[in-house]
Image (cartoon, rainbow, N blue to C red):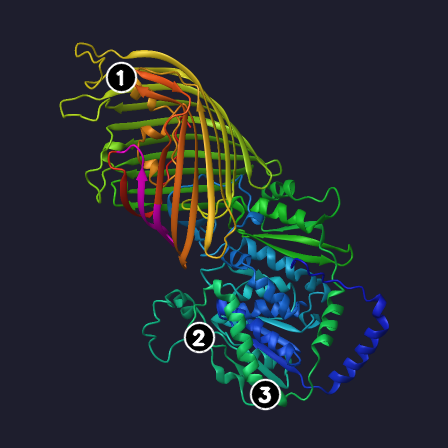
Amino acid sequence: MVKGINPFINFCKVRNILFLLLIILVAHTAKAQRVGVVLSGGGAKGAAHVGVLKALEEEGIPIDYIVGTSMGAIVGAFYSAGYSPEEIESIIRNPVFTNWVNGTNSERYHYNYTRAQDNASWFTFDLLLDKGSGPTVNTPLANDLIINFILNEYLAQASQRAEDRFNGLFVPYRAVAADLFTQNAIPIDSGSVMQAARSSMAVPLFYRPIKVANKYLFDGGIYNNFPVDIMEKSFEPDVIIGSNVGTKISAEYPFGKDERIMNDMLLFMVLDKTDPSRIGEGNLYIEPNIVEESALDFAKVGQFIDSGYVAAKKELLAFKPMIKDTINKSLVQLQRNEFRSGFKDLAFGRLELYGFDDKQSKFVQKLINFKNGTRDLEQIKSAYFQLVSEPYFKNIYPNFSYDSESQYFVLELYLKPTARNALSIDVGGNLSTRQISSLQLGARLNSFNRRLNTYEVNATTGLFYESLLMRARFNYNPKTRFYFQPKLVYNHWDYVNSKDIISPNRRTILLDRIDRKVGGALGFGTGQRGVFSGEMAYVRNTDEFSNTANFSSDDYLDNLEMKAYNAGIRYERNSLDRKLFPKGGSRFYASLQYYNGSSDWLPGTTSVDYNPASDRFINKNSNWINAQVSFEEFSLPKGKYTFGWTVDAQLSTINPLFNYQSTLLYLPSFEPMFDSKTYFLPNFRAQFYVGAGIINVFEIARSLELRLELYGFEALKWLEEGLDQEAVVNTGFSKPQFMGMAGFVYSTVLGPISLRFNYLDGEEKNFGLMLSIGYTIFNQKSVE
């Protein structure tokens, strides 16, 4: 509910006054005009209806009925549920409202323990696999898991108060939805207010449709975006006031404005063309001055509310005298309080599942049960978002119903019957001015067979980086969030083929790295965002490298083979808002890893130990511990500025291997920047170091930001190369090293487009200019 608003008032102390007011009200309404308000669809622009309702109440215009379509149905549902225009405005103006609509997870509604490792995908194509019906597309543009729950949270008590009769709401109400099978507009007049409002806003491809009375219904704007006729048929009011924000720009081509409204093309294709003449003479037509604004721009909802308010005030100057009987705003509030005084606390006593088979039901009931009595809203919310954080259950939608006999609410969960197996296809990668461009393809199968299982394969190909990731995840207990995850990883980095198109003379190191890791991890979730895991694995790496910067075609590279057993523990808590270039949230990571194995080294021609008469590998046993603690955090934005900071500390007990270069390969590295992960940077590698940085993000325009990043690196135990290429260990304080970036980042649906000017200490060419489109994200290395 809205923070700071108490919807329940004890009327015992004012019973006599209220009784008198009700008598006056009955006498008043017996002869008053009946006024019906019609609210059109129009996406984000529907927020203007809130301003219209606010103006109507201020001018004393009675609102006896409401009919709405799409966003108009949402605003109408809140008003009919007993929320004042000011309360609705407070909800919509809150920045989290945009997250609810877009399905963007926030700290409050996200559980991280099921979050997959970030990959370079641009988009994901979802299919539901069913033996009977075959594969079906399941890729809505927006995630509706949050908005579905929020609508229940705000509207369920009104349904309970009205006993599921929309005529019994604070204001009698109709939501208009569309039946695509019969091609009819459907006015919904009973049942769950949440389901009615939610079905009315189910724009095809944007939101999933939900079932109402066992029918899949879609956005009502498809067949009736301005439902004046439904108002007339349902309520027969004396006066109709219509607020329309759904007018299409069709009189002439919008030269100079077409680029700005291109995002609305989908809405224009599916929504019925609103006809203002439907309102008829003797009624009031209000059209806020926002025709040229985008219906998808939820960042402007405050502006739209103001526009609706101004437009309504202007039209009411001439129309108000036509209303015979006005009503004082304070009396409306008393009526509203009386309606809301009948709300029951959101206490839940039962779970009902629809579309679930027996195995799925048992899984859900382990997480959500009522063995210890009723559960409050926060407990239900926690369990719900914990459940839907599993990708397999993202086809669930909830409904709160009320059991009047038992005097508690019932949590109903609906699962699409064909959602037995869900296949997700990922396509992504990176296009760059350096030769690090890559293409990534991946597939994930979420299946339920005795337990919830996930199977994943991900492949990346490119000149610089190629990889193969295969893993599975077996979830044993949803409540404790205990899982087992076997995994196989293959990574290949070719630093020779990472030349820079913009700066072709930049020095590249002669290094070809292959690492392989196969093993398994046991883990469990901690809190809302944390995951703790323990793992055991086998590592086998191959490195080919030069010991000098000068290398000819007649030379041979050193060959290093590392074989080791690995055991370790990790903890991560991640709420960063983006997988690349974040500007919100935080991430804490801690790891302790033990390696025990052996190394085989064959010196090449650039090694002082090269022996042309011998091709025998030199063997050495190695065991060491790696420990890491890192933290990254962004503060809340101050206007258009966001500040972030990061710190990273790593310690390795590895002893020198065969020479300086071979040891350097296995030292911890500081790689905080986008491009630092694509270079082999000796100056930012050490056995023990502390690194830190600051991140400044300036919002220049919508989706465009300027990032200024500066990082410092201090080695406390590091290597130097001796006269005979041996590794010389140093301790104390080394000369600090710095790296930084100034870059423009433009966020798109497919990923970021970034232009970056980098500085790296210790490089022959300290400065570099890079341009890339998409994501450069690597699998975790075998020894980190």
The C terminus lies in quadrant: top left
- Report how far apart the C-alphas of labels 1 and 3 lie in the structure: 91 Å
- Which of the labelled discs sits on residue 319, or is there none? 3
Residue 129 visible, this angle: no
Give the amino acid type for the residue marked by disc 2 in the picture: Val
| Residue under numbered circle 2 | 291
532 relative position to 498: left or right: right
- The residue carrying pointer 1 sits among few (fewer than 14), some (14 to 19) or many (20 or more) residues within 10 Å by Cα, namely some
Choose between 349 and 153: the one closer to the eye.
153
Q: For the residue carrying disc 3, how many other residues have a C-alpha within 10 Å: few (<14), some (14-19), or many (20+)?
A: some
> Position of 664 compared to 565: left or right?
left
SS type, badge 2: loop
Query: Which tag, 1 or 3, sits closer to the chain's start?
Result: 3
Q: Nearer the viewer, mark 1 or mark 2?
A: 1
User: Disc 1 versus disc 2: distance between alpha carbons?
Assistant: 72 Å
Q: Earlier in the sequence, mark 1 or mark 2?
A: 2
